[in-house]
Amino acid sequence: MIAVLKQDATIDQREHLISWLKEQGLDVHISVGREHTVLGLVGDTGKIDVELLQSLSIVESVKIISEPFKKVNRKFHPDNSVIDVPDCDVRIGDGSCVLIAGPAVIESREQLMSIARKVKEAGASVLHGDAFKPRTSPYAFQGLGREGIDILLEVKRETGLPVMSEIVNTNHIALYEDVDIIQVSSRSMQNYELLKELGTLRKPVLLKRGAANTLKELLMSAEYIMDGGNESIILCERGIRTWDFSDGAARNTLDISSVPALHEMTHLPVIVDPSHATGVASMVEPMALAAAACGADGLMIEVHDDPLHALCDGAQALTPEQFSAAAEKVRRVRSVLF
């Protein structure tokens, strides 16, 4: 349930109403927008007399929300949420298209430092590199672990780029204290115990859609994080499994329609990962341009200085030079359309 307050409602009137609602055992989520203040009510709203609430002098309207996701719902928060990355000037969801770039997995200090400097020069605002990497095969390279986190943070200090890395285990949370954005991969989207733990943090979490998950399921996973108190969530579309009419030309189907659909359903920013969506380097740039054109709040692109010898996902990685060219085209698309 949501209660939309009138524009002339005073702070004292609002706080008095919020206090009363909390006395009814409800969790009250406050969203102060450009035109209205919206109170999102979570809990057993059946005990609330809707007609009584509607009759209050400061209440403009009361609406029942039927969707199972509440706090991430745009009805709760009509204005777009803008996610501030701590201790830097990166903002995701403010109308710009933020570029996140880096290798699929950290292989060495030299490798990550070289890539970081090149993607920063090309316009990337966030460096990505995984220290822990879940792989389909137990025999594949699964990252450097703690050493990889140390390398990532060293590169962060030397380049000034905020960093993002994937988490795979709740026991690793302490290692990510200085990591600016924690990534939850598609495989972990429904690891609810992990999501609950991330809800206790106060730092941005990038949540990827699972390969077989609906948009509602993605939003319910985001709800787990937000229900814990962490409202800094970035959604990521990275391709889904569908009927393959391309004879194996691409790894997944990039559901580009999810971007405008999610923007209607939620106030959270939405970015696109064309690298995992296609699995083919030559398809990354055109899909990145499509995502930029349909209003994505950012792009996550894998970059490797030697894709042929990459220890993970080399086939989908752009070279730094290819990334630079793609980034310039993305900027031109955004300048024309937005």
Image: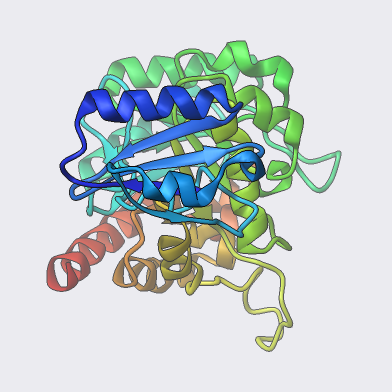
The image position of residue 110, as x and y in percent, is 44, 25
Between 209 and 18, which is closer to the camera in this rendering? 18
Q: Can residue 306 be seen from the camera position used here?
A: no
Quadrant (top left, top right, bottom left, bottom right) of the C terminus:
bottom left
In which image quadrant can residue 291 be found? Answer: bottom left
The image position of residue 128, as x and y in percent, is 45, 37
| Position of 58 relative to 23 (above/below) | below
Residue drawn where x is 60% and y is 50% of the image: 69
Between 89 and 66, which is closer to the camera in this rendering? 66
**Colour convention:** rainbow
Q: Can residue 285 be seen from the camera position used here?
A: yes
The image position of residue 25, as x and y in percent, is 61, 26
Residue drawn where x is 50% and y is 64% of the image: 281
The image position of residue 104, as x and y in percent, is 56, 43
In which image quadrant can residue 161 be found? Answer: top left
Residue drawn where x is 47% and y is 45% of the image: 52
In which image quadrant can residue 285 be found? Answer: bottom left
Q: Which residue lies most toward the right here?
A: 138
| Position of 10 relative to 307 (above/below) | above
